[in-house]
Every structure is written in C-alpha cells, then in structure tokens.
Amino acid sequence: MSDEPQQPSGRHEPGNQPSGAPSARADSSTGTAGITDTTGNADPARHNDGSGTDEPRQSDGADEPQEDGHPGRTGRRRIAGALRTTIGALLLMALLLLGGLIAGYELVDIPAANANATAQSNVYLYRDGSVIARSGKINRENVRLSQVPLTVQRAVLAAEDRDFYSERAIDLKAMTRAAWNTLTGKGTQGGSTITQQYVKNYYLGQERTVPRKVKELFIAVKLNREQPKSQILEGYLNTSYFGRNAYGIQAAALAYYGKDIGRITTAEGAYLASLLNAPSAYDVVVHPENRTAVLARWHYVLDGMVKEKWISPAERAAMKFPVPGKVRPPTGLSGQRGYIVQAIGDYLTAHGVIDENTLATGGYRITTTLEKKKQNALVKAVDDNVTSQTSTQRDIDRHVRVGGASIDPATGRVLAMYGGFDYTKQYVNNATRRDYQVGSTFKPFVFASAVANDSITQGGRRITPATIYDGTTKRMVQGRNGPTGYAPANEDDRSYGHITVSTATDRSVNAVYAQMAQDVDPAKVGRTAVALGIPKNTPDLTASPSIALGVATASVLDMTEAYATLANHGVHHARILVDKVSKDGEDLALPGPNTGQAVPREAADTTTWMLRSVVEDGTGTAARSAGRPAAGKTGTAEEDRAAWFAGYTPDLATVIAVMGQDPKTGAQKSLYGALGLSRMSGGGPPARIWGQYTGAALLDSAAKNFDLHLENGFDEEDLDYAEWEIEDHYGDGRYDNGRYGDGRYGDGRHSTRRPYENLYGPPAHRGSAPPAKPHKPGSGTPTGGGTPVPGAGHATGPAGGGGNGADDKTGGATEHAPRPSTGVTPAPPDTHTPRATPPPHTSTAPRQ
C-alpha cells in the first residue's frame, strides 16, 4: 500500500487539495484504525463484508477503476515510490559510511614510528650461499624545519605538493584521477599528499595493500588535525629517501653536495627535490645516460617555484644545473661489493620484483647467480693485467677504468662481474654503464644479420666469409641508388685493397663492414643486435652504415649477453642476476625465463667460425692464453677512449673493457700512454684479462670444441678459392693507394712493386694451377659495391696474412692459417647460381 491516501477521481494537483480531501483517523465505532474522508464515509479503497473487518479491495490492475469508481495507483505513483525507496537506501548507505568513517577515525590511533628507523640490513649471497655483502643500514640525520632554507622547502613543495599548506590531509580528486589513470592503462600514478607520504614513511610502511591504504587515510586525517603543517613537513623531509643510501634531506645534502642542508642553494635544493621522484634513476653520477630526464625534472621544479611566485623569473634564468659531487658510499661496500649490490638493486627494480624504497627498508635475503670462484678469478685477472701495471709516475694511469662480465650462454646467468677498482673510490659501475662506444666488437652483429637475412652485395652475390670487398680506406659506401656520402677511414688510415670478409674480420677493416652494413640494411642490423641482447634504447644505435663501426654505447653486460647468444647457436637468454629473494621466510616472485631464437643457428655459427680466426691469428691472439677453443672480437672506441675484447668458448661468454675517465670531472679521456703502452687496443690488456680469466674460470672443466652448422652454400674451401683469386688478380698494386711500402707509388696504378706482399705474404702461387675443387653454388666472390671480381685460376693453398689490424695496434698478426675443421658441420649446397668462371683480367677497373 501507498503511504499516501488515494486521490479521488477529479483530484486537484498537489498543493491545491479541496476541503473534502481524504485524511486518516481512527474509527471509534469499530475499534479499528480506519481511513475515512472528511465527511465520515469509509475509505473508498476498502469495503466491509459484514465481518467487522475492512480488507483491501482486489483489482486486476493498479490503474483499473475500483468497484466504488475510484482509480487504482498510477504509474507516476509507482515511480515516485521507487524513487523514495532509492533515496532512502542511499541515505542509509551515506549514514552507514559516515558512521564507518567516524568509527574508523575514533578507532584508528596514530601509531608509534615503524621499524624503518632501525631497519635490518639486506644480505647478498653468492650462488653457493656465502656472503657477498650486507647493506641497508639507514643513513639519516634529523634536522629541524628551521634549519632547512625556505627556498629548499619550497622546492620540495613545488616538486611534490604545491598546495600543501592550504589543502586537506587527503586529496580525493587527485586520488580518483590517479586511480582512473591506472585503471585505463595510462600508467601507475600517485595521488598522495605530502601528509599521506609522511604517514606511509614514518608510521606504516611501503607495502601496497588496501588495509595499509585505509589506515593511511585515517591517520593522515587525524594527524592533519592534531599536528601543524610545519611539523608534518619536517617529518616528511627527515624520512624521505633520496638515493645513495641517504634518508632525510640532511643526509642527502651531505651525500650529493658534501655540505649541511643549511648551506644548500636553491638550485641544489631543486635537484634534491627532483630525486624524490626516482632516487637512483635521477642520480646523474650513477646514470649519466639519464641526464636529459633529470634536467627535465629539475626545470619542472624551478618552473613551479616561479609559478607559485616563490622565486622570480630573473633568479630562475640565472640558475645553472648543479652537478652533484663525488659519491662517498659506506666503506662496508668497498671493492666489488658495492658494484654488485648496486647492480642487483637495479635488476630487481627494473624487473618489478620490488621497488627501491621497499628494498631500502632492509630485511631481504638475496641469492645472486654469481659464482665466488669465477668472481675472484676475474678480479685477479684485472689486478694482474691492469691494476698492477699502473704507476703513480704516469698521470694518465689515473684515468684507467675496467669493466667486465661473464655469462653462461646456456642459461643467461651472470657468473662474474667487475665494476671498477673500488666502489668507495669510484661509484659508477663500469659493467653496467652505457656511455662508451663499443667499437669493432659490434661488427659480428653485422655479419650475423647478413646471414640471417640472406643478404647480398651490391653486385648481387650472397654475403659469406669468402665474399670479397674493397678494403680501401675512406672508400665511399655505395647504396642501391648511388653513393651514401659516408666514407669511413680504417685504423691508421690503412688500405687493404680487395679482401675477403673473413680477413676483414681478422683485421677489423672499417671500410668493408660499413659497406656490408649498407648491403644488409642498417635497420636490419639494428634489429639483429637487439634480438641478440642489445637494449632497443641503446644510445646511437642508429640505422646508418656507421652502425657497423660500433658507435653505439651498450654496456659491458649488454655486450656479454649478445655474445652469449652467438655462443649458444643463436638462442638468446635474457640475463639473470638473481636466483632467489626472501624476507621473513617468504620468497618473492621473480621474472620467468625469457628465451628465444634470436638468429638462425647457421647465422650464429658461421659468425663463430670467423671469430675463431680473430683469436687464432687476428687481432685477438692474446686471448689464446685461455688454452681452449675460443672465438672473439677486439674493438677500440674513438681516440682510444675505450678498448674492448668480447669473446667466448662453447660454455662461457665474457666481455672486458678498459675505459678512460677523468676522476675529477668524469669526462671520457684517451688512453694513449696508459699502462706504459703507446696505444690502448682491444688486443692488449682486455684480451689478456679475458684469456687469464677464462682459463682460470674453466680450469676444472674439460675443454669443448665448437659444434658449428655453417650457412648453406659455404665451406672452408670457398675461402681458399677466394683468397687465391685476390692473390692472382689483385697483386699488382692496382688497388693499392701507396699505404704499403714507403708511399712512393701514389695510388698504385703504375706501381711495379707488389704491395700485396704486405697483405698476404709473398705471392708464391701467382699464376699457378687452381686447387682441385668443384664450383659450388652460393659461394660467389663479389666485390663490395657491386663490381664482379675479374680474373680466373686457382691456388694450391690459402694465402698468408700479415700487417696490423684495426684493433691490434700493439703488434702485428702472424701468417693467416687455415681454420681447424673439427666440429664443423657443412650445410648442404643451396640452389644459388653456380659461380661462373671469372672474366679475364683487364687493364683498368673502377675503384670501389
């Protein structure tokens, strides 16, 4: 029944009821509560059956007229009733919510400070369970708000909460916006006020749970009513984490600028405020590659201060970015321990295992993939070949830095890592930094990409180790539509004339590999490098022929991961640094394995086949000290600012880099004269470190041969044939520019001297009969740039090799020797056009 009386037919609109409108009153004659109209008649909605009881009249429809002529309840009445019910329910819910909020406010008390003030240390373990390091001791010195310069306080507000002094404890609008952005895929965003952040830091913890968030809201509201804003801001500044193991703004001032907070300038304060957004990532000393993002955040803070009229535009314009000073980490992290702790922290946060602030609270037990024996062997190899060779009498030796890493190709597990001489003296991890060019260690990726993509030269022939290119220095790289405008010089501006890809790899000839990158397509080369393990966002990983020369600045760990993929027959395993993380007996979830076939096996294995020669008689002969089958590549950055050796055995991939850096300014420096050497090359200290370490690391395991599947249509005989063709048809100096000998022969066009002797040894087999070898399909020998190789004939054996290579500046290579065939499985011939008999030698030919 309705809670309102029925209107008679012909009723007036509400507010204009007639005097005879029905009303409720007690029926004294029957002793029951009846409804009558004002004239004393019974309620027309009821009837009396003589039993003395009024019962509701039955009807077939609410809107049908009743027996007494009155209509039933209308649709409008039903809607009004439902609306009243809904409103009532909402009011009830509001009352319950209000009651809950009041009860929560009364029941939730402001607790004592959490255990963060006395946090446990994190323990880092080798794979065998022995301790590497302990970290996590809180570095904090509380200060009063009055000790913090006003401009520094305002810089923090500009960065984190500009309406702090005028807003409530919680910002429902910001929280709703943050939740919506997170749910709609715009990224996880924060909506917390400074008051909420302080509550989380000081009273609760960093865990992300609904109960913690609810408590945070109630405590923030109560705290905002019971404490002044200045006290809350003071607590926030003393409890926030700024990176470098610094808790609180006083510890941050000392860690980054070496002075008390009271002496911090506005510009420095703006940088400290910027750190609150991403403490470690925004440390430009540790991560120089993030400088652009740091500057953007710093400008955002200062622009906010101008907008709030806390500083003038003129003051803002006069400010320069204040680069933080030398890092002073705890002595407990000396030697390699600090580098390992830093790398593990970066790994865990990058993979979403745990955020930085939570990890910093301590109490975690972290088992790494590092093996103690191999780690010690790597440190000793660096000490023996670099550290012990430095001298205080040579100022340049102060610039020497070393980075190293070693990975198991079959699993991607990092087994050893060398970050620098001492974490307490040099904070930057040389194994993970991404700001030094990798040089010619990038060239194998170009060749692997050529095989993986079935690439051809400009002349239309497949690229194999036997393909002939023009190695003339400063030769213009040719594209499909003509010159590209890029003409790289070889090391020491040396020309090699026509040369096979294999020998060009041994000698690290820039002219050949730049042309090869163009033939393959630089964009494809970049994609191959990324598939092998080089990060997609690596600086200077550009789609141009220069990519072949290693202008990209991948880290030592990145390069180790990529070379491990080559060692593993093209199967890529994303590197793993952590085996287990636990706290209070519970394990945290770690990322699952990330593996896949980066390049076909034939592409990886043919690359390995060539790189073995670099170790055997190319620029990396020093690596033979490992005493087992090995493949590798040397590399040198521009002006000898870094020298690399990247190599592997079938069961271990390792990369070593020696870098030059000014200890005061951090600027990259050339290493001419370092360690008493005239030049710093990848075939020098890096290769010697690699050889000593690899031999020691694998001492207890049997040597393994490479099991290789070469690309279709190529075998070792093709290389012999190609080298004979070069000797027989290019040994008259026609393509020599005079760099061999004393330079009296100009461009070599009219020379009677045989400069070929300086490339491959005496031309003992010129004009002799070819080896008994059938013409095989798919093993063509074109020149780079598309011109076919002229001449015909065969040789009785491979030509010799000689002269310094691009990266072997400390000594010449020995005679080119045939590669061992053990373990090599030739692939079946492909269906390419058989190699035609080379045309007769002509008197002139275009220079490529």
Image (tube, rainbow, N blue to C red):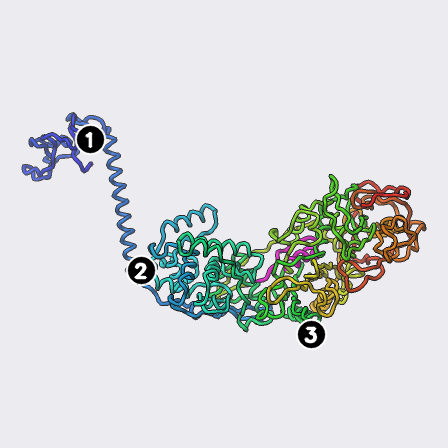
Q: CA distance from mark 1 to mark 2?
A: 59 Å
Amino acid beneath label 1:
Gln
At label 3, the amino acid type is Gln
Question: In the drawing, what numbered circle is on residue 171?
Answer: none
At 27% from the left and 51% from the top, the residue drawn is: 96
Task: Residue 169: give x, y in percent of width and height.
Answer: 34, 56
Q: Is residue 577 magenta?
A: yes
First of labels 1, 2 by sequence position: 1
In the figure, residue 615 lies in which quadrant? Answer: bottom right
Region in magenta: 557-579
The residue tagged 2 is 222
Q: Amino acid at mark 2?
A: Lys
Residue 58 badge? 1
Mark 2 vs 3, N-terminal side: 2
Of callouts 1 and 3, the N-terminal one: 1
Q: CA distance from mark 2 to mark 3?
A: 66 Å
Write down the residue under mark 3.
393
Residue 709 x %, y %: 76, 52
Give the percent coordinates (x, y) of residue 287. 56, 60
Badge 1 element: loop
Q: Is residue 326 left or right of residue 703?
A: left
Crowd band around label 3 with a 10 angstrom C-alpha radius: few (<14), some (14–19), many (20+): few
